[in-house]
Amino acid sequence: MAKIVWKANQVISIETRYKDEDRKNNIYVLAQMVNKAQLLIFDLYSENNNWGDVNLNEVPILFSTTVTRQFIKNSNIYKQSIKPLTNFELPKYKIESLGMGSRNVTVWKGTINERNVLILGQGGGRLIEEDMSTGNYKTQIIMPSIPETDSETIDKYELTNVRVYAELNERLYLCYKFGKNVDPLKDLIFDRPIPLEYKEYIDIISS
């Protein structure tokens, strides 16, 4: 596979889940490189990595997130000759974990699938606005603490976390499986119920 070089507005497809797993049906998702290390993830999937005459102006954006070089290096990524989306605005609001240090979260307690996961922060998050218009990174606190019952805010905004392989790949597969934008890491941070379908994700981040 050819080495992928980061290029703003390059449309790509990403193979979800572990690239070295022997699966009968691999799932691919369309994305677009933005800025230095940010991806737009589109709500469009394929089992054969064939996208036809897709028009990205007609495809919903699932979410945008920042990724590491490690994600680009280790994922199966394919350049696509698809006209990039240009009329979009990246969200300024993000969710930042509350507290310093880390904590242990136990999922599926008392079952054969019980797992302990180390999560940064002390639980919950706050809504911040990121401003880089001056060339310097500045944040403004919009909500000091998002209530765990405020599902609308929690579901609407992405975490500030930079995503990695294979954590993000598995999340992308789960978005496909559930038919919506899901983020197991966000669910862990806000102490939400964790479906058993997250098992592989949990194993990835706890290994």
Image: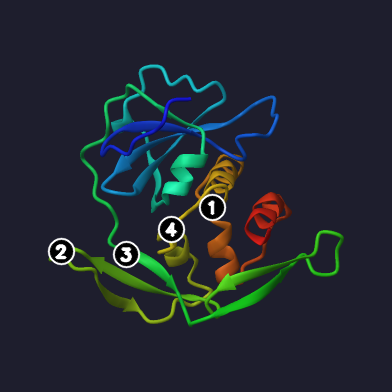
Numbered badge on residue 93 = 3
Is disc 3 placed on a helix, strand or loop? strand
Mark 2 touching mark 1, by CB under 8 A? no
Q: Image check: 61 left or right of 205? A: left
Kind of residue at disc 2: Gly
Q: In the figure, residue 82 lies in which quadrant?
A: top left
Give the camera-side residue of 156 and 71: 71
Kind of residue at disc 4: Val
Residue 61 spot, x, y in % from top left = 37, 42
Crowd band around label 2 with a 10 angstrom C-alpha radius: few (<14), some (14–19), many (20+): few
Q: Quadrant of the C terminus?
A: bottom right
Q: Nearer the viewer, mark 4 or mark 1?
A: 4
Q: Which residue is mark 4?
A: 162
Q: Nearer the viewer, mark 3 or mark 4?
A: 4
Residue 117 spot, x, y in % from top left = 67, 67
Mark nearer the N terminus (2 vs 1): 2
Mark nearer the N terminus (1 vs 3): 3
Is disc 2 placed on a helix, strand or loop? loop
Kind of residue at disc 1: Val
Crowd band around label 3 with a 10 angstrom C-alpha radius: few (<14), some (14–19), many (20+): many
Q: Which residue is mark 2?
A: 135
Numbered badge on residue 182 = 1
Q: Residue at x 32, y 21 (%)?
A: 81
